[in-house]
Structures are given as structure tokens and as C-alpha cells.
Amino acid sequence: MPITYLPLEHHVVRYVPWSRLRKDEDDNVIGVLGAAFKLRAQEDYLSATWAEFFQGTRADCIFSAIKAIRASSFSVTPRSGFAIGNVGRVKDACLADKQRHRIRIIHEPEDDNKAHSALRGWPRDNDPLLDLLAEDMWSETVLNKDVPHSNP
Amino acid sequence: MPYKRPPITEAIIELQFARPSDQSTIEKAARRIREEYTFEDPDSAVNLSFDASTNKTEVQTAWMGTRLSSSDRADILIFRTTAFVCSRLAPYGGWEAFRPRAAHAWDVWKRAAGPTPLARIGVRYINRIDVPLAGNVLIDVDHYLNLSTRSPEALGEPMTAYTMQIVRPLGADDCHLILTSGTVASPLIGFASFALDLDIFRATNLPMRDDELWALIDRIRGHKNRVFESCVTDRARALFDQ
Amino acid sequence: MSAVQIPRAVRADHAHLGRAVIQKPSAGVSGISKEIADRLKRFAEPSPTFLGSRNVSPPKSLEEQLYDGLAAFKVTTATIAMHLEREWRSRLFLQLDSLLALDDWDVEDPPPSTGSFSTFLRMLILLRPARRPGLGATNDGILIATWTSDDDRLTIDCLDKDIARWHLAVTIEGERERAAGITPLLRLNEVLLPYGPQRWFEHAHYVSSP
């Protein structure tokens, strides 16, 4: 089966639980923590959803990606969020790091999410890089509570 | 005058029963006061016993009572089969807040359990004196506490820890004092910490009437204050007022 | 003079903080040595408040784990609560309630460990920030403290035994600087000093988000 790499100009949407949203002291969400992009011990790749797998405007694509995540086996909690990152910028940032991570962002559809993508070669122990991604290349945040459950 | 930062880590009023109470009474009392506390949890003891013949350790759990806590877990009320325990953890809010809560809880207990003969009345305040090290590694306990720990100068090096306990009649109200003091591993970085644990109790001629009981508890609290003030130095007091 | 030499503890074991320092002597066989052993044991006994426990077996459900974790955090905070402003502490507890709310907790995550929380508390007493941090948690049980002032970000992962894993991004004289490290709490003030930590810790530099 051919490997589909996500185009550089496309976007990935990653689910971010409440505990990994960056907040101020009054629990106002102000972004994403680097920890949102950290692999679990048993994970080989980072999971995300390909926004442009869906059709329509940018907003339509992101909404559809979020809808796909919600419909998947993921338990999307009320105060969680979604981080949107540009494929090319994420790859460039990983390569520009002194550890020169060559990551591959591959479309790997799953039964419960046809737009699922895997970020392979993802750094396992580079917190400063993850923090940079959270601050810049993968920082656009949409809160779950702000996304309607049906088409706007 | 109350201190700005009293060094109290725990204040306890414990009334030990002359006869054990039963679970249904405890549950009845807990139900009646439940809405005044956020959390209710069982209070259990764990006993480990080793059977040499089978080489196995047996874990036995015994339900002891019910524990009620405020949302910040600082106000605690425990109805046990053997005792009534009302506690306040830090930050201590003063006798004016602690005592009425305890008296009210006791009133609820009495309405559920009926007359409850007591075996021991205790008021215990556990203090921790946190001394900033400010670059020092040698702290003179005498600068903060009027309790002496002496060892021969000939031993040379200073001690690195101490624990002491004094038990003596208080000379008032048929009460006894258990005073325990010692070094504790400081929860603060850059500090040395010393415990001053004052437990004043009475185990004889215990009042049956609640007005007499709480008048005695008020007097015990006064004794405790007197003992505390006699144990700490002005240098320690300065720490409590920072 | 009753001088006590305070040992320099590089990494504190949270389980022993606030507890009596009792040295167990060499084994004895006489009645006196047994009596001394019993007395030493009693010194280490919990007060009547903590004589019993809620659970005698490890909590099974996530709800139980979060419940027990939050209770333990609040009781642990009580050990140093006399050093915190009351309002500050109350609001911190609201943040903890929010962070560990079952409805929003990722089911695959363990709750933050008590060791991590102990490091967090000791860090707060050491840094004495006027502003409380934002709170988060890693997927492996580490509490995260964050401060953000405009684009300047400080993130501290509170590891067990007084270790802080920190990273920051600041703009100083128009230049963007980033730094990261793993540092014992004892040195944290020193490593943050070049980056002007008052930008995060003091209210004057903070602009509220809408």
C-alpha cells in the first residue's frame, strides 16, 4: 500500500486534554503545553488528524477533523482542546533542532478515524523542542467547548 | 494576642469513650452532620500478622469509624468506635473557630448516641517551629525552645537530631502534660524544623455534663497556651509574627 | 547550648518530610531495649487524626485515584499552610480541584504523584511567587507549573525528590532567548535569575487575558 505523506502546506490537528492546556492562574486557557506533544512510554508515533483530508474551507476542514476525533474511540472531555499545526513548519522545526529529527507525517487511517495520521520518528526526549512547537508552530488552539457538535 | 503565622500544624480535641460505640450510632451521628462537611470517608485500621507456619503475611482491616472533612481537608471530624476526634490542620484559624465546631459536633454525637461516659479528655496541639537556616548549618535549639537537650561536651561533634518526651502532672484541673519535642525533617527548603507537641489530658473525675466538659476543655486550652508560651523564646515568637 | 547540625539534604524524600527524625538503634534482646524500641515506635505514630485510613488496598478506579490524590495533596499542603497566604492557598485548591476533575481527566493518565506534588509545594515556598502558576500534568504523573507573561513563558515540571525540569522562552532587549535544564530545587532561583523571574512572579508585569 502506498505511503501518503501529508503535504507541507496542510495541517494536523492534535487532541489536547485539559491537563495539557497552558492556563493562567485563573484557569483561563492561553495555549498548549509542550507536554501535549510528548509520546507515552508505549507509543511509537504521535497521533494527529489530517485536516485537509476533509473538503471545504480551512474552518470546514478543522471542524471536520475535530468531529472525526470526537467520533473516534478518544474520550473527548468537555474542557479539552485541539492544537492545529502546519505540517511543513512542524517538520522544519524538528529538523532545525540540534538533534535534527527527521519526522515523517503519514496518513494512516484507522477504523474509527479515516483522517488519522502518524508522526513517526517523533522525538522521545526533547522537551525544549516540544515547548517550541507548543509556543509557535503548533500553537493554534481551539477549545472543545467552542466547537459546535453539528455543522455551523 | 494571636500570632500572624501560628506554628500549629494540628489541633486536636479527643474524647475517648469509656465503652465502645457501635457502627449504627456512628452512622446516625455522621448522617446528622454530613451536610456540614464536603467529604465522608471510612476510617479503617490495617493490621499485619505474620504466620510463621505458612510463611505468609495476613492483612486484616478493621473498620474504626467515619471521617468527615471540609473541602480543603483542614477541618476534620472523626466518629470512632472508641473516640470522638475533632481536628484542625494548618492554617489554624483560632480557638474561636475550632472550639465551636467541636462543641457542635459533640452535641450532634450526643443527640445520636445519648449519654456517653468518657475515659479520657485530651487537647493536643502539634507545633512545628521552622527556623530559616540563612546559610548556617548549626542551629541552637535553645535560641527557640526553653527545653534543654544536654549531652556531654566531651562527645565533641554537635547532634544531628534529638527526640524527647516529658510527662508530668500539670498541677491544675487533675490534668497531665505530655510534651514531646524533636527535630523533624523540614518540609521547607533552607529551614530547620523542630516539633513541639503538647498534649494535655485528664483521665480521672471526668465531667458528665456538657457544660462542665466544655468549661474544662476551655481551661485545658488556657493551660496549653501557658505551657506553649513557657516553651518558646522571643526569637521563636518573632518567627510566628513574620 | 543545644546545637543541632542540620544535614544538607540534596534530594528530600517526600514521605519523610515533617516527620520525626528517629534513628533506630542496634538490635537488643533485653526488656529495656524492647521498651526503648516500643517508645521510639510511639514517637513515630500518627496523631489520632491520622490513625486510620480511607483505603486499605490500592485504589482501583480512576475516580478513586483522583479522589485520593486530591485529598493527599490538600493534607500535604497543610504541612506548610502557615507559610502561604490564605487566599492564595484557597485559590490554589480551586486550581487543583479543576485539574483533577474526573470529567476532564484523560483516562490514560495516572494522577500526579505525591512526590511530584511535594516538589511543587517546596518550589512554591522557595520561589515565593506573588502570582500562582497555571497547572498542568504530564501523561506520566508529573505536575507542571507554568507562568506566562505576554510572550514570556516559564514551564517547570516538578519531578520527584526536589528536582525541577524547567524550560523558558523570553525576549530580552529584543532578542528571543530560550533555556532549559534539570536542576535541584536548591539551585532553581540561581538558574532563573539571569532571565528576570520577577517578570512571571510579580503581578506588576502581568496582563490579564480577556
Image: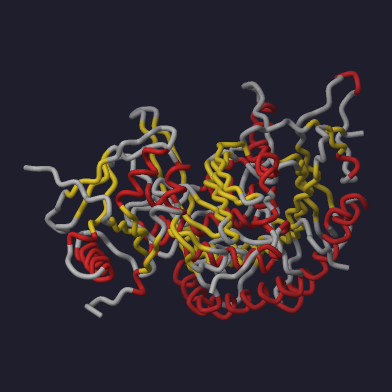
Q: Is C30 rendered above or below residue B210?
A: above
Q: Residue at x 23, y 64 (%)?
A: A65
Numbered disc total: 0
Q: Nearer the viewer, residue C38 or B190?
A: B190
- Left or right of A130? Residue C91 is right
Q: Position of residue C44 (x, y in %)?
A: 64, 41
Q: Is A82 rendered above or below residue C174?
A: below
Q: Residue at x 62, y 61 (%)?
A: C132
- Left or right of B182? Residue C16 is left
- Colour mapping used in the image: secondary structure
Figure quadrant of the N terminus of chain B: bottom right
Q: Is A44 rendered above or below residue A14?
A: above
Figure quadrant of the C terminus of chain B: bottom right
Q: Position of residue B68 (x, y in %)?
A: 53, 68
Q: Position of residue B188 (x, y in %)?
A: 70, 46
Outermost residue on the left side: it is A1
**Is residue B79 at least partly visible in the picture?**
yes
Q: Nearer the viewer, residue C33 or B123?
A: B123
- Left or right of A49? Residue B11 is right
Q: Position of residue C159 (x, y in %)?
A: 52, 42
Image-quadrant location for residue C188: top right
Q: Nearer the viewer, residue A43 or B225?
A: A43
- Left or right of B52? Residue B157 is right
Q: Residue at x 41, y 55 (%)?
A: C65
Q: Residue at x 51, y 72 (%)?
A: B38
Image-quadrant location for residue C166: top right
Q: Nearer the viewer, residue C157 or C195?
A: C195
